[in-house]
Image (cartoon, rainbow, N blue to C red):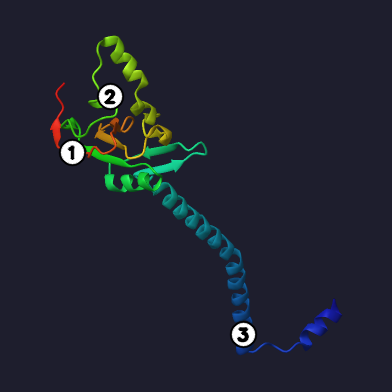
Amino acid sequence: MDALKTMWETVPAATESELAGARRRLLSGIHSRRRLVTTPRLLVTAGAAATAVATALVLGSGAPAYAVAESPDGTLTVTVNELHDPDGLEAKLAAAGVKADVTFLTPGMLCAPPRFTGVDTTYGGPPADGPGELRSATKAARSPQAATVTSVRTIRIAPEHIRPGETLVMEFRDNLNAQVPWHLGMWLAKAGSPVKPCAPIKEIR
């Protein structure tokens, strides 16, 4: 104990500048430790925020108004989410090999007939002699075989039932219902029969 006391007495007292320097080094060490602890936490938070933004962009991007997809069997699946840009849909169908005339109508409206000469009885085709023959003619009609509504937003088109020069006429009517967004009339116009522009009229029920 006496030896320690003697040794302590031989240590010179620190000056004010030395004490100040020691204090600065101590505080610097504390701040450095704080930075090492907090920086990774900030990086995690920034990463989480970036992920949240990316997710919002993906979820916020709406589906396209329409799309045309070709199946291996040659049929086309047409998806219509919004009644917007009928010319664009016609162009997509033309690129897939189907000549089409597409019209988008407001609720309660239809195109004044006749607009064209149909290939069968579904739209102004050859008359049938009686109810039995009418049912038979409708069953054998190519228009329903060429295009069929398969769900509330999709249509299946079978080009094999559309002959050269024929036009697939599609009249969509807005239904103001998110579950069933539109009603659709589809027919085949004869080759060489021009399709007149749609003159909208109110549907009579």
- Label 1 sits on what residue type? Cys
Residue type pointed to by label 2: Thr
Closer mark to the observer between disc 3 and disc 2:
2
Element type where label 3 sits in the image: helix
Give the residue number, with chain letter if any, for mark 2: 122
Q: Marks 1 and 2: which is nearer the front?
A: 2
Q: Is residue 202 left or right of residue 13?
A: left
Q: Amino acid at mark 3?
A: Gly
The residue indicated by pointer 1 is 198
| Residue 134 vs residue 106, the one in the foreground | 134
Relative placement, left or right, of 125 versus 158 is: left
Image quadrant where one finds the N terminus: bottom right
Q: Earlier in the sequence, mark 1 or mark 3?
A: 3
> In front here: 30 or 8?
30
Q: Is residue 72 above or below residue 54?
A: above
Read off the residue under disc 3.
Answer: 21
Element class at badge 1: loop
At x 32% / y 45%, what residue is drawn? 89
